[in-house]
Image (spheres, rainbow, N blue to C red):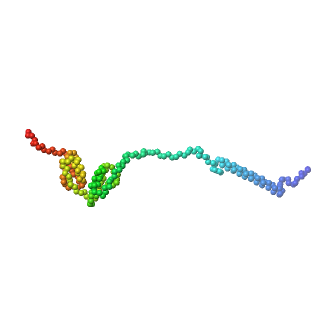
Amino acid sequence: MVGAVTDGNTVGEAYPDEADAAGSGRSAKLLGGGLAVALLALVGAAGGWLLAGEDDPSSGLPAAQPDVSATAPPSEAPSSPARTTAPATRTTAPTRSTGLTVPPVVGTDFEDARDELRDLRLGWRLVFGAESGRDVRRTDPPVGSPVSRGTTVALYVAGPAPEVSVPDLVGDDCDDAAEDLVEEGLYPGYPTGRTGVVTAQAPAADSTAHWNDKVALTCGEEPGEPSAEPPPTP
């Protein structure tokens, strides 16, 4: 039997130095496999991140915003609220200025002040006071106020109303008698009307009265005078 030439290692056992070599090779294979698995894991994670980045715009760089200036309609100015009520209309015509004013009668005698108002076709009302004197202390409306024809001006006199004698008016026309009373500072009253002639008066003629006192005038038909001839006998 021809014997085979061997190195004495028939069971494939490694020598000590070969064991290190084999161990080193196995470690290299294990390390290489681990690196490959780690590399694949990294590649897979990177791919997943890229896919996630495509699906989620919030990850990574911010997504570009669309330009809405070209498509958005121009802003409109707010419209003014609709008028719900009609504007107020003028109900009265403006008062036309006549240029007439209350004359400067303060400090003058009240009779002179009254005559000046009458000349201007203004009315008057005498208001007497409790002091002494006949001068006008103030007026209402005040001096210089614009007035129109017929306006009554109050004259405030310092002292009391003076005495005046009542004129004899019996037999005068009722309207004429009224003017005479006003001239004397008195005012007429008409208990029976103001048509005809004055048939009676009270107070009587030549009685003493005061400014602003009233005199009652009884007006009517004047009684006929008796005939000179006696009436015929039946």
The picture places residue 197, in percent across and down from the top left corner, at: 20, 46
In this view, the residue in front, 18 or 90, is 90
The image quadrant that residue 31 belongs to is bottom right
Left or right: where 93 falls relative to 216: right
- The answer to whether one can see residue 219 in this image is no
Task: Indicate whether 182 appears above or below 229.
Answer: below
- Side of 78 where 188 appears, left or right: left
Residue nearer the viewer, 20 or 136 = 136
Please identify the residue farthest to the bottom as the structure is shown: 132
Location of the C terminus by quadrant is top left
Total numbered circles = 0
- Residue 24: give x, y in percent of width and height: 79, 55
x%, y% of residue 70?
59, 44
Does residue 119 appear in the picture of this structure? yes
Give residue 74's quadrant in the image.
top right
Residue reaching furthest to the right:
2
The picture places residue 199, in percent across and down from the top left corner, at: 18, 48
Question: Position of 13 compared to 46: left or right?
Answer: right
**Residue ID at (15%, 44%):** 224
Q: Residue furthest left?
A: 233
